Image (tube, grey):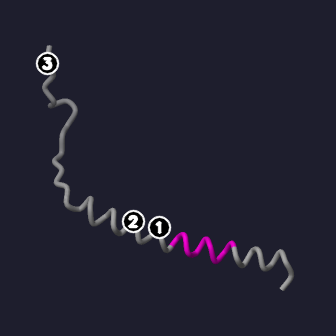
């Protein structure tokens, strides 16, 4: 392979590795966030101090 093709292949491999790492981080974040409980709050029903 010529030099440009080798560089492109290396960048593709690095990008793939980064995507796999990012996917792992997303899964970990989903696990953490799933522990939070939320409720629906409608802006018009929030009481405000006068």
Which residue is identified by label 3?
A: 49
Crowd around label 2: few <14 · some 14–19 · many ≥20 (10 Å): few
Answer whether residue 13 is magenta in the image: yes
Q: Residues within 10 Å of mark 3 (few under 14, many from 20)?
A: few
Label located before the other in sequence (2 or 3): 2
Q: Is residue 25 left or right of residue 8?
A: left
Residue that appears at 33% across and 67% down? 28
Q: Provide residue 5's location: percent of width, then percent of height.
A: 80, 78
Q: Are marks 2 and 1 in contact (CB under 8 Å)?
A: yes
Name the spot of residue 20 as percent of width and height, x first.
49, 74
Residue, far bottom: 1
First reached walking from the N terminus: tag 3 or tag 1: 1
Tell which residue pokes out farthest to the right in this image: 2
Residue 30 in the image: x percent, y percent? 31, 64
The residues tagged by marks 2 and 1 sit, at their Cα atoms, a distance apart of: 6 Å
Magenta stretch: residue 24 in it? Answer: no
For the N terminus, the quadrant is bottom right
Which stretch appears magenta? 11-19
Residue 7: which disc?
none
Secondary element under disc 3, as helix, strand or loop, is loop
32 lies left or right of 49: right
Taking depth in this image into account, of 46 and 22 the one nearest to the observer is: 22
Residue at numbered disc 2: 26
Q: Residue at x 64, y 77 (%)?
A: 13
Q: Main secondary structure of the magenta part?
A: helix
User: Is disc 1 placed on a helix, strand or loop?
Assistant: helix
The image's mark for residue 22 is 1
Residue at the (18%, 40%) spot, across then down: 41
């Amino acid at each position: 392979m010529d030099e440009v093709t080798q560089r492109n292949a290396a960048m593709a491999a690095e990008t793939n590795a980064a995507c796999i790492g990012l996917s792992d981080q997303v899964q970990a974040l989903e696990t953490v966030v799933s522990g939070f409980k939320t409720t629906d709050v409608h802006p018009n029903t929030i009481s405000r101090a006068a």
